[in-house]
Amino acid sequence: MAEPRRRIGRKQKNEDFYKAILLLKDEEECYSFFRDVCTQNELRAMEQRFEVARLLTQGMVYNDILERTGASSATISRVARSLNDSTGGYDCVFARMDDGKL
């Protein structure tokens, strides 16, 4: 697991927020929680970044990702950088999804 200070940079993190996420029981609860916490645009941006990361890890090229997701080349580049400088979060989730633990 990543060191706590690396999770969100130099800012103090709120441990209760992350623990609260772990208490959610199903997709509907998760969606409701994030819908309350985030604006619609923030939620869509996170969903888009997640999809871009998934496609990049599957080897899809930037132009195909742009066409499929509507993400800008800047967003795709940012996600690619986050994958390269990863703390393992994407890898962990994608591995679990591939193992059918979703």
Image (tube, rainbow, N blue to C red):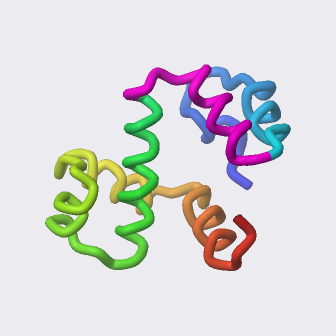
Label tally: 0
Image location (x, y in percent) of residue 87: 58, 55
Image location (x, y in percent) of residue 68: 24, 62
User: Which quadrant of the rendered structure holds the N terminus?
Assistant: bottom right
Camera-nearest residue between 47 and 95: 47
| 22 sits to left or right of 82 | right
- Image point (69%, 47%), residue name: 27
- Could you say which quadrant of the image residue 18 lies in? top right
Can residue 34 be found in the magenta stretch? yes
Judge whether 60 appears above or below 75 on screen: below
- Could you say which quadrant of the image residue 12 lies in? top right
Image location (x, y in percent) of residue 76: 27, 54
Q: Which residues are magenta?
A: 26-41
Secondary structure mostly taken by the magenta-highlighted segment of the chain: helix
User: Which quadrant of the rendered structure holds the C terminus?
Assistant: bottom right
Camera-nearest residue between 83 and 42: 42
| 21 sits to left or right of 7 | right
- Image point (45%, 41%), residue name: 46
- Could you say which quadrant of the image residue 85 lies in? bottom left
Judge whether 8 appears above or below 81 on screen: above
Image location (x, y in percent) of residue 86: 51, 57
| 91 sits to left or right of 19 | left
- Image point (22%, 50%), residue name: 70
Furthest toward the front, the residue is 28
- Image point (80%, 25%), residue name: 16
| 38 sits to left or right of 79 | right
Judge whether 53 appears above or below 95 on screen: above
